[in-house]
Amino acid sequence: VISNVVYTDPLALFLSKTAEFVPQLGPRFGLDGNKVMPKNGGVESVETAIKMARYYGWKKKNIPDGKQEIIVFNNNFHGRMITVISFSSQSKYRDGFGPLTPGFVSVEFGNLDAVKAAVNKYTCGILVEPMQGEGGMKIPPPGFLQGLRKIADDNDLLLMLDEIQVGLGRTGKNFCFEHENIVPDGLILGKALSGGLIPLSVFITNTKLMDLAFDKGSDGSTFGGYPLACVAGVAALEVLQEEELAKASEVQGEKLKQSIMKIAGRSKHIKEVRGKGLFIGIEVKNRDAMIFCRKLLDLGIIVNDSHGHTIRISPPLNISDDETGFLIKCLEEVFLK
Ligand SMILES: Cc1ncc(COP(=O)(O)O)c(C=O)c1O
């Protein structure tokens, strides 16, 4: 095993490319660039973000260790390990797996007043998906991310964005936070980071914050930053940039969404269509999206449901005009016949 003890060329290249691809995070902590902590599955990097916020609360805000609180959101999905399921609002992820991890306060997604009300002297951070993927393909009201940024600044909290599902071009921008012209203090990426080929996720933050919280070996993972994963990561970032996949996602996504809205106008099954870029949800009236997913599978389209009631349309970012046309034809077949 070439573990993370050994520094390899692919690791160095991947870390520097990733750190530079992301705008300076947490600029209020300085402009010395970003640092990147590589892990494997996405949930591992979510846990790094949680550790970061807690440590910051303890070290910089003098919150007694063990009392730190992080604000999270109802219907969140950040993975399936113990700490993360501890603040899931879905019993299927949580029930029977106690004792659960304390230190999280969950409020309504999109509700800034609820966030303000949840802040107290123990709060150290906010952890949020800028758009909820598993939670029903939910897009928060305009101004939500800016509002979170302001609450974080006003109360000295770390704003951590989980862009594992919606980052890297999925919503028509390289990063979802660009839709509202903010930058978070910490960012979590996964899934598409290696082109979906090999487990690879990262937690990225301001250099000062990363250095504050983690010393050599105090966080890490044997396979985190494994050379093969880093080679895939470098290639995926290059393709994303060279093929301008965020722009492609914006353009194809808009076409697709317009067509789906037209189908929705003529279909008795569709309640709502929502999304940005190639992140589109079709909420169905009978609240059983899987029935329609199966019909689409019979026609050659692989889609999953989100939160039971919504079909998740999330095709590859390099989908062609012809493929988009085929997808629309299949949706017409299922929803209009
Ligand atoms: C927003 C979000 N966070 C975290 C995760 C967990 O990632 P992984 O399954 O790679 O641990 C997912 C997976 O779907 C996700 O969508």
Image (cartoon, grey):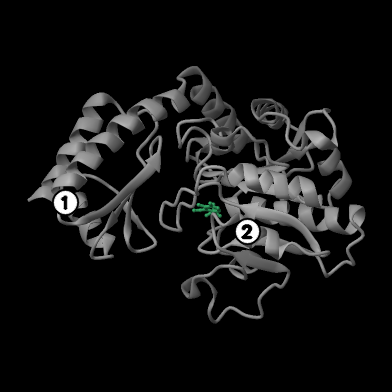
Q: Are marks 1 and 2 in contact (CB under 8 Å)?
A: no
Q: Can residue 201 be seen from the camera position used here?
A: no
> Residue 37's x, y, as percent?
72, 42
Residue 247 drawn above or below residue 281: above
Q: Is residue 225 left or right of residue 144?
A: right
Mark 1 lies within 8 Å of ligand 1 (Cβ measured): no
Residue 11 drawn above or below residue 57: above
Nearer to us in this view, 213 or 4: 213
Residue type at tag 2: Asp
Residues under labels 1 and 2: Cα distance?
A: 45 Å
**Residue depicted at x 73% and y 28%:** 12
Q: Residue furthest left?
A: 337
Q: Residue furthest top?
A: 242
**Residue bearing the label numbered 2:** 113
**Residue depicted at x 90% and y 67%:** 64
- Disc number lying in front (1 or 2): 2
Nearer to us in this view, 214 or 63: 63
Disc on the earlier residue, 1 or 2: 2
Quick one: quadrant of the N terminus?
top right
Q: Is residue 47 left or right of residue 302?
A: right
> Secondary structure under badge 1?
helix
**Residue bearing the label numbered 1:** 298
Q: Residue furthest front?
A: 113
User: How many other residues sit within 10 Å of disc 1, few (<14), some (14-19) or many (≥20)?
Assistant: few
